[in-house]
Structures are given as structure tokens and as C-alpha cells.
Image (cartoon, rainbow, N blue to C red):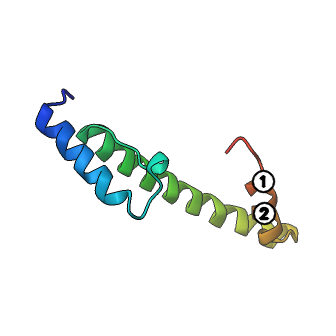
Amino acid sequence: GQQTPEGLAAIAKLVSVYAYWVPQENIITTNLWSSELSKLVANAFLAQRISSINSISALCEVSGADVDEVARAVGTDPRK
């Protein structure tokens, strides 16, 4: 959405507050709707990962694979 001078000032103030605990290069600023959608998508991705590892766990049980080893191996894939 369109940013106002007041909104930009609020963003700058919040960044200055969070910068006490979080390195400034790790602070992401967006407009309101991008922020909300980012939160929803992150939660959906987490739910998908949990669902996937549960399915993989079931496959491991019937195949004799170790779910921890499979999860570690998949976790090393740089494409994430």
C-alpha cells in the first residue's frame, strides 16, 4: 500500500526499538498487507513441513529408514 510520512516515521521508530535486540540487517520492514501475508504464509509453510515430516515418518516406519537421518539429510539441501 501507499506509505505516509507518519507511517514511515512509525517504521523508523519500531526499527530503532527492535535494533536493541536484533541486528538491523535482520529487521525486515514491509507495508501492512505484505507483513500480514508474510505471517500467514510462514505459518502455512510451517504446517506443511510438519505434515510432510509426519508422512515421511510413516514411510520410514514401513521401510526401516531412520526418520532423524532422513530429516537431517533433507535439511542439508541448499535449495530449501
Residue 1 vertical position relative to residue 54 in the rendered view, above or below: above
Residue 17, horizontal then vertical, whole percent: 29, 59
The residue that mark 1 highlights is 76
Residue 40, horizontal then vertical, whole percent: 36, 50
From the viewer's side, name the closer residue of 7 and 46. 7
Point 20% across, 37% down: residue: 8
The residue that mark 2 highlights is 72
Please give left or right for residue 76 compared with residue 10 in the image.
right
> In what element is the residue under mark 2?
helix
Q: Amino acid at mark 2?
A: Arg
Where the C terminus falls, by quadrant?
top right
> In what element is the residue under mark 1?
loop
Q: Residues within 10 Å of mark 1 (few under 14, many from 20)?
A: few
Residue 65 vertical position relative to residue 30 in the rendered view, above or below: below
From the viewer's side, name the closer residue of 76 and 52. 76
- Residue 38: image quadrant is top left
Where the N terminus falls, by quadrant?
top left
Point 50% across, 51% down: residue: 45
Q: Amino acid at mark 1?
A: Thr
- Residue 51: image quadrant is bottom right
From the viewer's side, name the closer residue of 43 and 17. 17
**Looking at the image, do the residues carrying marks 2 and 1 touch, with CB atoms under 8 Å apart?**
yes
Residue 18 vertical position relative to residue 15 in the rendered view, above or below: below
Label drawn at residue 63: none
Q: Residues within 10 Å of mark 2 (few under 14, many from 20)?
A: few
Please give left or right for residue 17 compared with residue 64 in the image.
left
Residue 41, horizontal then vertical, whole percent: 42, 47
Residue most extreme to the right: 64
Q: Measure how far apart labels 2 and 1 are at the Cα level.
A: 6 Å
Please give left or right for residue 71 compared with residue 4 in the image.
right
Please give left or right for residue 10 compared with residue 15 in the image.
left
